[in-house]
Amino acid sequence: MSKKDPMMAEKFKQLSVLENDYAVKLDGEVRGYGNEIFRDIIGSIAVDSKKHSGLFKACAAISNGDSLSLGEDEYNGLVASLKKHEAVEGNMIKTVDDLLAKTNDERIRMMLNHIKSDEIRHHLLIENLTKMVAKKEVILEKDMWNQLFRDVLTHGHAPPDQWEQPE
């Protein structure tokens, strides 16, 4: 676990707000475009900005030392969901590669290459998410039971009437 860094947390919060505001602005502007292709392209940029906002928000929480704990069942559900999504991302990378091999239109190739790079980054993020964040702080059900019963105040400690008073 990293040390708290309130200054970085604040910077990440500001960046999250900035990206979110940009996403809202783009989303509003895109509605005025008569060309559906441009609406879709600009709309996807707005979605990316919304995603960036969420990632900055997560960075702020981590920098703030916020708990990322999950219960054991939640963690197992997250892992199962991410494994399924990881497979989808892997298949999408293969599909885009196949499409890239079949087209010569540079406009299409540019968008397919952008999609492919996004899919690769998504795949890597999903692959590492449980390792880098959630798994480190998962609270196992046995840990909760131990906290409730095995580690109760008087078990292995002096009774409360014999505790030293803080100064």
Image (cartoon, helix red, strand yellow):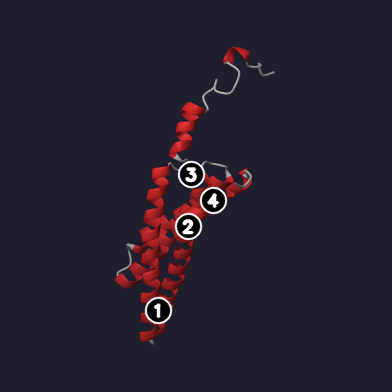
Q: Check disc 4 and give the amino acid type.
A: Cys
Residue 147 visible? The answer is yes
**Is label 1 in a helix, a strand or a loop?**
helix
Quadrant for residue 105, please give it: bottom left
Q: Is residue 74 above or below residue 23?
A: above
**Mark in the foreground, 4 or 1:** 1
Rounded to the nearest angstrom, the CA distance separating label 3 from label 1 is 37 Å
Pointer 1 residue: 97
Name the residue tied to disc 3.
138
Which one is earlier in the sequence, the residue at label 1 or at label 2? 2
Which mark is drawn over residue 136?
none
Circle 1: residue type: Asp
Residue holding disc 4: 59
Relative side of 119 to 163, left or right: left
Give left or right: position of 57 versus 162: left
Dot 1 alpha-carbon crowd within 10 angstroms: few under 14, some 14 to 19, many 20 or more: some
Of labels 3 and 1, the one closer to you = 3
Depth order, front residue of 52/75: 75
Single out the mark in the foreground, 1 or 2: 1
Determine the residue positioned at 45% across, 37% down: 142
Residue drawn at (63%, 46%), measured in percent from left and top?
7
> Residue 52 shows which numbered tag?
2
Viewer-nearest residue: 57 or 11: 57
Q: Quadrant of the C terminus?
A: top right
Residue type marked 2: His
Question: Which of pointers 4 and 1 lies earlier in the amino acid sequence?
Answer: 4
Find numbered disc 4 in the image and state the secondary structure of the residue it sits on. helix
Q: Nearer the viewer, mark 4 or mark 3?
A: 3
Closer to us: 21 or 6: 6
The tag earlier along the polypeptide, 3 or 1, is: 1
